[in-house]
Image (cartoon, grey):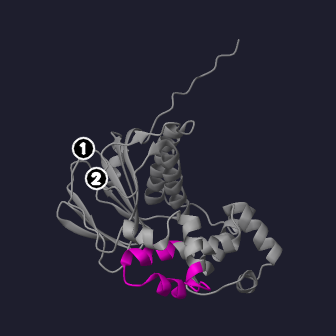
Amino acid sequence: MKTYFKHKLTNLISVSKIVTIHHFEFEKNFKSHGESHDFWEIVYAERESIICSADGKEILLNQGEILFHKPNEFHTLKANGKKAPNVFIMSFVCKSESIKFFENKKILLSQNLKSLIFSILEEGKKTFDIPFSDPDLKKMALLKKPTLGGEQLIKNYLEIFLINLLREQTETEQGNLTFLPWKELSNKTINDVIKILQDNVYSSLNVDEICKKTSYSRAYLFKIFKLKTGKTIMAYFIELKIEKAKQLLRENELSVKEIADKLSFNTPNYFTKTFKRIVKLTPLAYKKRH
């Protein structure tokens, strides 16, 4: 009879508890009261910059950057008074020695790590009852019918995120790959299209113009984009416009008609209908909520 060795697995980073998950759409003049607690907190600037402080030191967190607050560190958060930011905040308990690497760290995230942030957020929404933009949330209640395995996936996604971030910050990439696999090539194509859409969010743009800019056929772009994002190019473009509209409404400097014109909607009425379909609120109701 063969003897097998059962390898005991070690954990580099182990998250034992999730405290809060937030996705905030702040107004441009938002300012928190400040707090400290005996667990870790990460702050990710999803859109626009945000001003943080850690034990009295002010830190500018630019779009795409993440900041770690260590346990018992007093910290505050405020918008810059000019732009209305979107911010992801998550707090958790982790006693692993490796987590100490992230003390006082501000890091620009790669695209893959940004995807994990949104995976955590999506699982959070399907698992917990997370109030809309509530900075004072102290306890997340489970949904009446949470998604199967949601809590475990949140824990796993966060641990995978932290381990991969630790790798990126500490390991040197070996070798130089000249061949780009099909999957990576496809992702580059998607990223190129999304960059064009983002750069033209205030303009009118059609698929033929995007094909010309990327040198890909209409059929190829449609197939790849829908396969990777689950949406058509123009549906994604409209959602980008609505996200920008939400930001402009929170900044409270333009009327609904002016925002519709700025984002190149044909009429204010069409803008309002589109906004309500995606956000489930009219632009005025959304503005009032903030």
Q: Range of the magenta residues?
A: 243-269
**In x, y percent, where is residue 236?**
63, 70
Which residue is more in the foreground, 262 or 38? 262
Q: Quadrant of the N terminus?
A: top right
Q: Is residue 14 above or below residue 104?
A: above
Q: Which residue is mark 1?
A: 38
Q: Report which quarter residue 82 is drawn in.
A: bottom left
**In x, y percent, where is residue 199?**
56, 83
Q: Secondary structure at mark 1?
A: loop
- Asked if the stretch drawn in magenta spans residue 56, the answer is no
Q: Measuring 47% from the left and 64% from the top, which residue is drawn there?
A: 109
Mark sitting on residue 14: none
Q: Measuring 47% from the left and 41% from the top, which residue is drawn there?
A: 155
**Residue at the farthest front position:** 269
Q: Earlier in the sequence, mark 2 or mark 1?
A: 1
**In x, y percent, where is residue 218?**
80, 77
**Residue 181 in view, yes or no:** no
**Residue at the farthest top position:** 1
Amino acid of disc 2: Asp
Q: Is residue 197 above or below residue 158?
A: below
Left or right: residue 28 compared with residue 247:
left
Q: Which residue is mark 2?
A: 136
Q: Report which quarter residue 228 is drawn in.
A: bottom right
In three-dimensional space, the C-alpha distance between marks 2 and 1, rounded to whole angstroms, equals: 16 Å
Number of other residues with Cα within 10 Å of mark 2, as a class: few under 14, some 14 to 19, many 20 or more: few
Which residue is more in the foreground, 25 or 177? 25
**Most frequent secondary structure within the magenta stretch:** helix
Q: Measuring 52% from the left and 45% from the top, which residue is drawn there?
A: 126
Left or right: residue 67 compared with residue 35:
right
- Number of numbered discs on residues: 2
- Asked if the stretch drawn in magenta spans residue 254, the answer is yes
